Image (cartoon, rainbow, N blue to C red):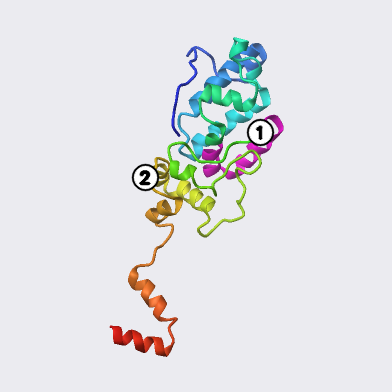
Amino acid sequence: MKKRNTYRFDISVPPASPALKAKNPTLYCQALARDLLARTKSTNGRAECSDLVETLHKILEDKPWKKFPLDEKERARSFSGFVELIADYKLEELLYRIGLYLSDEAEKLKAKIAGVDKRLISPGAPAGNQNAANDKTITYSVSNCFAGRATQTGNNQAYLLRRLARDFPNILKQYENGEFRSVRAAAIAAGIIKVPTPFEAACKAVAKLNETEKAELKKLL
């Protein structure tokens, strides 16, 4: 994901623990914001995404945007606004990454988001890949960002993205950086999709010819 400017924090802020929440709710909100910023710096694996999901659940439950930043004029008015203020990523970018690695956990997160923030997330993929952003079949919103999970095999794009995330993260990263024109091209490079050689394609085609067509083909050869 493409990084832009980030909110600055005092490094002395303690961890966002239940004890801090009880003792100093305002400081706890700042600690949650600091954790969010830290955990959006890397989302290239299941462990990193799991940490991010945990933090997002806490934010949904505790609504830190109501108390942080301290200057009320700087505060966001919603969950999505808070996430984008602190992490400086569009919410759909984070949901996109989480959905690739942790689809089940993403479903739970989606349900919570729908109850707190009604904003729909715009269709598209991370900004680094304009080819992916132009692919109308990859859409993510609060209501449908993880739709299509019933298709677990074949060349469905959601399936291919999950396979790339699970088995070929380096190729997925190349795809997101725009090095492949499509998900299919990335999947071919990874070996997920097998493209027949000309010989294999010819053998398959010959098998479908009738006797007259085979005789004509022999003349050509």
Query: Mark 2 Cα within 10 Å, few/some/many (few <14, many 20+)?
Result: some
The residue tagged 2 is 179
Label 2 sits on what residue type?
Glu
Tag 2, which secondary structure? loop
Give, as a single range, the part of the protein colored magenta. Answer: 95-117
Give the percent coordinates (x, y) of residue 175.
Answer: 41, 45
Give the percent coordinates (x, y) of residue 155.
Answer: 50, 58
Q: Which quarter of the rendered picture does the N terminus lie within?
A: top left
Query: Mark 1 Cα within 10 Å, few/some/many (few <14, many 20+)?
Result: some
Give the percent coordinates (x, y) of residue 92.
Answer: 56, 36
Q: Residue at x 43, y 57 (%)?
A: 192
Q: Residue at x 47, y 39 (%)?
A: 45
First in residue order: circle 1 vs circle 2: 1
Say whether residue 142 is left or right of residue 177. right
Label 1 sits on what residue type?
Ile
Residue 102 lies in the magenta-colored region: yes
Front residue (pair 198, 212): 212
Q: Is residue 63 above or below residue 54?
A: above
Q: Residue at x 58, y 33 (%)?
A: 53
The residue tagged 1 is 113
Say whether residue 15 is left or right of residue 108. left
